[in-house]
Amino acid sequence: MATTVRFAPSPTGRIHIGNARTAILNWLMALKSGGQFVLRYDDTDTVRSTTEFADGIAADLDWLGIKPHRVEWQSKRFGRYDEVAAKLREDGRLYPCFETADELDRRRKRQLARGAPPIYDRAALKLTDEEKRAFEAEGRKPHWRFRLDGRIVVWDDIIRGPQHIDTTGLSDPVLVREDGSYLYTLPSVIDDIDMEITHVIRGEDHVVNTAVQIEITEALGGHVPHYAHHSLLTGADGKGLSKRLGSLSIASMREGGLEPMAVVSHAALLGTSDNIHPCADYAELVAGFDLGKLSRAPARFDEAELLHLNAKLLHHLPWEAVKHRLPQDSEAFWLAIRGNIERLSDASVWHQVITGDVTPAVAEEDREFIAAARSLLPPEPWGTGTWKAWTDAVKAATGRKGKPLFMPLRLALTGLGHGPELAQLLPLIGPERALERLG
Ligand code: GLU
């Protein structure tokens, strides 16, 4: 069977680096196997899900270079879920329960007080038809639980290795609420079966769900997919990312001027046995991609490391890749400044230094030296050799060398004590501006 994976966000918010990592791992799996990637919106929660969030997620994925082969919406498949739920009811796997949240809560507390695990006691399974009718006559509507087999569910997780989960230790999960709406558990299984998903790659917060979902898949006579549960990201402080967004959202990384491939490389290589290095495109990542390289330990996400990776990526990017996004249409400009930026938007700082108003910084004791240097500026045309010719002449005339020779020239020409190689900057600054700044 051809590989088919899915990324299944709930469109109740935008995605952050942790969700993006799941999407990227799935996308790499699809690319590596020549398979299909399904973007599935888990929007059974019709109140909290919005099309704005869904559109935002699509835009985030697009920016990350992920191009789904198919897009599915759970909200369009309720008819299908009703059909399957009816079959599970018929088979006695889905049973009606009438307890209120308060009743369940009291029961759980009593269990805990006795030192018993707070598992649903299946009281509803013992209800007679008469009792059920009586509840309904009272106006109570049932919610529906899946009757677990209560066995050891086993699967060979691609990342975590052999897994054994004893479902006797779990409550029968509620699949359908009182109002007839579905929790995520059942629709997800139905979709995975109907969409012929071969590999479910998702966060380890779903490991226990997987045991339940395997039981449901088997109850429906479906083919159980391969599972891979990756560890979750933590922040630099070691705490989980799940509920925080802000600067961790893909939207803010995009707005903050990060390169998508820096974000992708970072997310794809974090927590693997490979060094985190900038990859220029997916092909480079696919070559080394193997889910087996992912560690089970939580991976630490540090924004500062991402920015560092972004800078590293830019330092090697060819002009062709960025020319439409630069403030100056010149390859020489790009080659001069690319080693001195962290974000592409920093290019405008150097554009300003080259072409804009600069306040030369000349110390009192360097005035004479700068005047001498000014008179020695080489004739046009200027090129990459100009800086060397000029500084050789200045050195011969003034006897200065090393830092005392170069730093005052840099400060006068750029107003700054650091920056790109002057050999590359000087021809871009040009004779007219150089004369003015040295004057
Ligand atoms: N909507 C679920 C989530 O975002 C999907 C989990 C899954 O991949 O099955 O956690």
Image (spheres, helix red, strand yellow):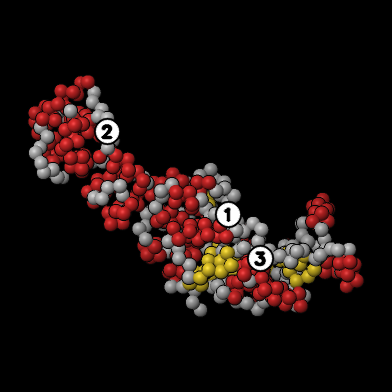
Instruction: State the image coordinates of residue 346 (x, y, percent, origin top left).
Output: 35, 43
Where residue 361 is drawn, which disc sits there?
none
Q: Is residue 147 above or below residue 301?
A: below
Task: Tell me the kind of residue under disc 3.
Answer: Thr
- Mark 1 — residue? 13
Q: Residues within 10 Å of mark 2 (few under 14, many from 20)?
A: some
Q: Which residue is pictured at 53% across the width and 46% down the height? A: 246
Give the Cα separation between the discs numbered 2 and 1: 45 Å
Name the N-terminal-most of marks 3 and 2. Answer: 3
Task: Tell me the kind of residue under disc 1.
Answer: Gly
Instruction: State the image coordinates of residue 195 (x, y, percent, origin top left).
Output: 56, 74
Give the Cα separation between the discs numbered 1 and 3: 19 Å
In the image: residue 131, left or right of residue 281: right
Residue placed most toward the observer, 197 or 234: 197
Tell me which corner region of the image, top left, top right, bottom left or bottom right, holds residue 393. top left
- Mark 2 — residue? 358
Q: Residues within 10 Å of mark 1 (few under 14, many from 20)?
A: some
Image quadrant for the C terminus?
top left
Instruction: State the image coordinates of residue 310 (x, y, percent, origin top left).
Output: 38, 49
In the image: residue 209, left or right of residue 38: right
Residue placed most toward the observer, 38 or 354: 354
Q: Residues within 10 Å of mark 3 (few under 14, many from 20)?
A: some
Tell me which corner region of the image, top left, top right, bottom left or bottom right, holds residue 122. bottom right
Please tell me whether mark 3 sits on a helix, a strand or a loop.
Answer: helix
Task: Tell me the kind of residue under disc 2.
Answer: Val
Q: Nearer the viewer, mark 2 or mark 1?
A: 2
Q: Is residue 232 above or below residue 428?
A: below
Where residue 185 is drawn, which disc sits there?
3
Q: Which residue is pictured at 62% across the width and 70% down the height? A: 76
